[in-house]
Amino acid sequence: MNDNPAAIERPTAYPTAAESPKVVGQTPTMDDVARSASVSRATVSRVLAGTARVSDSTQDRVLRAIKDLGYVPNRMAQSLATRSSGLVGLLLRDPRKAAYGLLHSELQQVSDRENLQLITVVPSSSEASSAEKRALQRLLGLRVDGLFVATGVIGPEDLAPFLSVVPVVSVGRPEAHDGVYGVSYDEVAHGQMAADLLLRHGHRDIAVLATASSVSVPESMRAEAIMARLLERGATVHPVRATTFGIGAEHSHRIADMVREGTITAVAFPTDDRALDFLTIARKSGLQVPADVSVIGMDGISPAMGMIGLATVRIPIEAVADRAVTVMGDLLEHRESLPIRHERFRGHVVDGATLGPPPRKRS
Amino acid sequence: MNDNPAAIERPTAYPTAAESPKVVGQTPTMDDVARSASVSRATVSRVLAGTARVSDSTQDRVLRAIKDLGYVPNRMAQSLATRSSGLVGLLLRDPRKAAYGLLHSELQQVSDRENLQLITVVPSSSEASSAEKRALQRLLGLRVDGLFVATGVIGPEDLAPFLSVVPVVSVGRPEAHDGVYGVSYDEVAHGQMAADLLLRHGHRDIAVLATASSVSVPESMRAEAIMARLLERGATVHPVRATTFGIGAEHSHRIADMVREGTITAVAFPTDDRALDFLTIARKSGLQVPADVSVIGMDGISPAMGMIGLATVRIPIEAVADRAVTVMGDLLEHRESLPIRHERFRGHVVDGATLGPPPRKRS
DNA sequence: CTGAAAGCGCTTACAG
DNA sequence: CTGAAAGCGCTTACAG
């Protein structure tokens, strides 16, 4: 968990002020407000809801009391009474990944705009599947009105029991259950875009890092699409199989060797991270990019990417988040009338400094 | 919001299967379980709580019924009855930033380990201060038992009214209210570490990008600490004032000019991002790093950083998250007896390929 | 070991 | 426009 040796060091502690500043008071309740404003609970509730007509003077008194007491309505009680939490849950896979971070941020923005209250739960990454189930339970226990699932491991079978209870939108994951509305990336198109860009630069002998689908479905889809397109266009494909999710340096070395042997003039990766790893290793071993080999990645999210100049395909996270929230809004309004679909959005190619024409044949 | 032109494009839609697979059923309630198991609600509750003794046979019947009905206890009702939500809220600033992403992930891990149920709310970034207040309300409305605040903008005055109601731990932000327990980074030490590293490499004429404290308190603290240490050690400091939060290319160009003029041999940045920007610009304009100028950043979080080889100071996010959760656990157990402190953790220096000895004096 | 009942803090017909 | 009362789905003394 904590591999930072400094963590063990005693922290600098600055004892401050006194103990708890105030007496620990009970949170004021609607009854307190009612009493303080000399009205009934019902009236306070009405003022809060802003729906029914309330005379100005009572309204004022109630508002004052609320302010004075620092009253915050208890949503638990509200939702119990109304049978609706007003909350939309987000099951998020891994906040450390830039793509998920951006997705989280975007979903949040759009939800806010649409007046959906988003609350996020992250399954602890250990014990992936059971953790995701527990996180799911947490959200369902909160009786969220809707659920965004942006996480890979949880299977349709876990989701199925709840589909009839709460609208679920699967976000940014390629595979989707028939009973679940899906909004995701068009990974096949992305693969084709990457392939086409390499072809356009004149490459014909191309390595592709092909992640096993057991490791990552999206990565595998991308790689397969790249290879299919290249073959279709008559290029020669040199697949390099990756069977680990982590970035394995061996792949990068293997590919560097292929460059030196003159077997390939370009290489495509299913993620920017993997491409970056290759770039680092290639440069260290004296290869020039793009003079000796052209490189393209996929994702386009990391802010560092632009500075490095890596060519890539930018996945349309913003569009996906936007659409997912719209769909959720629709589902919440007229649940049964919306036919379930799986929508896929495509991003755009980002040309970069890692792309050039193939080097002349070495003699 | 959505600056991706592809977003407008019609998505590929794959209509799937049928409409909603099942009839929309009401979520089963504890009463349903009780009836199905022919016991009272109280007994179901006891089985769920696992506290009181229940005969094996009833227990079995209840468990069966729960499974059969797919019963998930309504936490809203539970917390209303127990006056405790069992939830700890996290107010998170910006999920897009790698440092926050990692913090989020770590807090999640540790909370899980400590059996705290973490739920996260992100203030929509627009209208910073009021959005944060709304997000705060959302969490308080949920009657969280504790609150992590990992966001800069919200002021002590907004927090104050709730301090007596719910334990608050401020995480990773340097300034902290006297009434709030703080666990953060020792930015002063970090600044000194960066300064010392440059000095150790023999540099004496050093530029420091100094962010205004109105822009970012942590950045400003770091920069001030770097400069103070350098001066203390007899080096010549060339401050470059930054007054925007975004990365301004002008600063990088200015610093590059100072290198060419021979004014400085090294430069320190208060964030890796800013350092990266300089690296990019410096290299484009023909400067060699570290041959012409040494560079150090601060943060050490982005995965790309290692590949680039940027020297930096790695902030101890893991240690801070770990400690923050421990503190929260203590506060939840024996609230009044824990004196409020502000603890600061220090990270460690990461030497990198962007550091070298000062170039010989140009003639 | 088990059940009846009160109560948690709200909302919402139903009557004025 | 306003209040009394029932009910949302649980938990927890209090009695058996």
Image (cartoon, coloured by chain):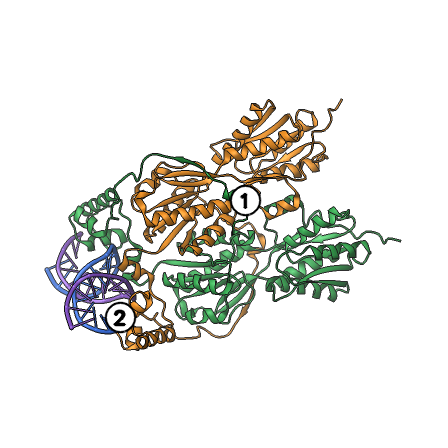
Chain colours: A green, B orange, C blue, D purple
Callout 1: helix, strand or loop?
helix
The three-letter code of the residue at mark 2 reads Arg
Give the CA separation, mark 1 to mark 2: 51 Å
Near-viewer residue (A176 or A287): A287
Q: Quadrant of residue B80?
A: bottom left
Residue B111 relative to residue A270: left or right:
left
Indicate the quadrant where residue B242 lies: top right
- Locate residue D6, reporting x and y percent: 18, 66
Chain of residue at mark 2: B
Q: Which residue is mark 1?
A: A5
The reply to whether residue A339 is in sight is no
Which one is in front in this view, the residue at disc 1 or the one at disc 2?
A: 1
Secondary structure, mark 2, is helix
x, y percent for residue B254: 63, 29
Q: Quadrant of residue B358?
A: top right
Residue A261 visible in image: yes
Q: In the image, residue B100 lies at what x, y percent?
A: 50, 46
The residue that disc 2 covers is B41
Residue type highlighted by circle 1: Pro
How busy is the neighbourhood of tag 2: few (under 14 within 10 Å), some, or many (20 plus)?
Answer: some
Q: Residues within 10 Å of mark 1 (few under 14, many from 20)?
A: few
* For residue B132, side relative to residue B253 (left or right): left
